[in-house]
Structure formats: C-alpha cells, structure tokens
Amino acid sequence: MHTPFLLSLFTILLGYFLKRIGILKAEHSGPLSKIVMNVTFPALILITFSSSRITKELFLLPWLPVLSALLGLGAGLYLFRRLSSDTKGLMLMATMGLNIGLFAFPILQGLFGDLGVQVAAMVDLGNAFVIFGLSYMVGERFSPVRENHKRGVWGTIKVFSRSVPLVCYILALFINLMGLSLPSFTLSWLSILARANQFLVLLVLGLVLSFGWRTHLKSGLVPLLILRYSTALALGTLVWFFFPADQVVRKIIFMCLILPAGFAVVPYSLEFEYDRDSAGAIVNITLIISFFLMWGLAIFL
C-alpha cells in the first residue's frame, strides 16, 4: 500500500529538484499540462473507460462532486460573508472542484489499477461540470471586473465542447454502453500515449510545487481549508458507510472526495483579476494536505 505513494512522492520530488537546479522551470508546467490534458490523459480514459464494466451504482458518482460543491458553496457564502467581494469570490471558487486529472489518476492507478481509473473517471464527469460551470460562474459573479467577462450559456457550452477529457469521457461511455470496441491498432497506439501519463502528471506536480503558501496562512486560508476538508470528510464518511458498492469502490470514492483544489482556480483568478499568489497558495497547500490524507485513508480504511 505504501509503494504507490512513495513512487509518486519521489517522482514529484524529482520534478521539484529539476526545477530547483534549473534544468526545468515552473513555466514548463504549462505546456506539459496541456500535453497531459489533451493527449496522455484522454488516451488513458479511452483505453480504460471504453472497455470497463460499468454498474448502475457508478452512475451515481458524477453527482457526488456536484453535491460537495453545493454544500461547500452554501457554507462558504455564510462563512466568508464579511470578506471583500474579490476575496470572497476566490475563496468560494476554491471550495469547489477536485484535481482529478492532474493529481488523482496516477496515484489511484498505482493503487487500484484500472478500477481506480474507472471510478475516478465517473467522479470526474460531474467534477467537469463543477469546474467549467459552477466554479466559473461564481468567480464571474464576485469578480471586480465581471462586466468584462460574461461567458453566457452558449459560451459555457463551447467550453464544455472544447474540453478534450470531457469529450473523451462521453465518447468512451458511448462505446462502452453500445458494446463497441476500439481497433487493436488504435488500442496499441493509445497505450503508448497512456503509459506516459503517470510520469508527466507527477512531474508537473513537482514543477508547480511551492512552499510560498506559508505566508498566506494568516490571510483567511485556514477557514477555507477547514471548510473544504470538513465537507469532503463528512461526505466521504457517508459514502463509506452507506454507498451501495463494494469496499474497494467506496474507498476510491472517499479518496476522490478529499482531492486538492483544481488547477482551474489559477487561470480563473487571472481572468477575473483575483490575487494570483493566493490562488497558487490554495492549489499548493491543498495538494500537500490531500496527498497525505489519501495516504492515511489508504492505510486505515
């Protein structure tokens, strides 16, 4: 159980070390992330998800990140009510969304194989709507420059249609439900791409890893962390005891619910002119907390 976490940790630290000695730079995480989200990650989805056995219980999973986001948003509106509008907007965005594509998959794949990818993929279906829809609309609502950034309904639909992972989820689900299969040559080619996903994701995490978040702990970050993880742990506990699935699946779902804030909070903070440093601090500190929480859950559940 420790091995996948240790392998992931050392690969993340490799990326951080390469950044520290100047071989790579934090800016390289951008192009590498695009390769992951548009090439290797979709390939992994198509291979694993198109041929997996999908039970009726798995169709409940996309609703869990939506429920978690709504609970966090409702509590956040009360908890952050005294903050300035721009700070409130950033905090509310950060209560929603899970970093599944650029954090969870390599760890869950190492722990549970294809089943880990399959369950996380179903959770990520709902998570995509939270990040591209709900989180964006909340950020736009409280932005000091919101009149310059009105995406609208059609704009939101276009964003969903341009999300390569989301399109691949839907395509793989269609292939699966229709009983179709991909040609053997296509599967072989996708396998080459998918094998690179785990390393690239962990390398990117090392490149974006920063410990500058410590200076932000006195600026309202602690209430956000308490809200985010208390909501996740409460919902995860309910899933663990009451979700109609076997123990391994419930364990994977619980681990998905305590994932870090999605990286989208950083580009959204730039678009809506929130504090970029605070957004980066949120992503980094939740990355560290979630990594060790997942490790703990893997051991004790």
Image (tube, rainbow, N blue to C red):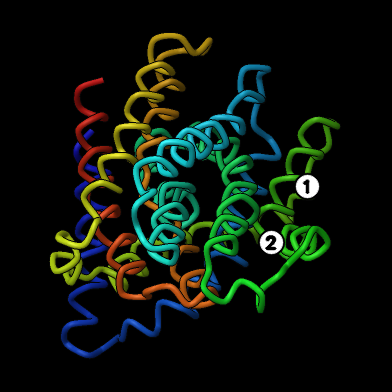
Q: Residue 227, percent across and down?
A: 32, 39
Question: In the image shown, does 225 or 11 lie closer to the viewer?
Answer: 225
> SS at mark 1?
helix
Q: Residues within 10 Å of mark 1 (few under 14, many from 20)?
A: some
Q: Is residue 31 left or right of residue 13?
A: right
Q: Residues within 10 Å of mark 2 (few under 14, many from 20)?
A: some
Rendered-image quadrant of the N terminus: top left
Alpha carbon separation for disc pair 1 and 2: 10 Å
In the image, residue 270 sits, relative to residue 65, either above or below, namely below
Q: Residue 69, percent across and down?
A: 50, 39
Q: Residue 77, percent across and down?
A: 44, 44
In the image, residue 248 sits, relative to residue 210, either above or below, namely above
In the image, residue 139 sits, relative to residue 273, either above or below, namely above
User: Which residue type carries mark 1?
Assistant: Leu
Mark positioned earlier in the residue sequence (1 or 2):
2
In the image, residue 287 sits, relative to residue 27, either above or below, namely above
* Residue 171, numbered label: 1
Q: Is residue 224 left or right of residue 212?
A: right
* Residue 164, numbered label: 2
Rendered-image quadrant of the C terminus: top left
**What residue occupies the far bottom of the structure in this picture?**
22
User: Which residue type carries mark 2?
Assistant: Val
Callout 1–callout 2 Cβ contact below 8 Å: no
Q: Residue at x 47, y 49 (%)?
A: 100
Q: Residue 182, percent across and down?
A: 78, 47
Q: Residue at x 72, y 63 (%)?
A: 159
Question: In the image shown, does 199 or 263 lie closer to the viewer?
Answer: 263
**What is the quadrant of residue 108 in the picture?**
top left
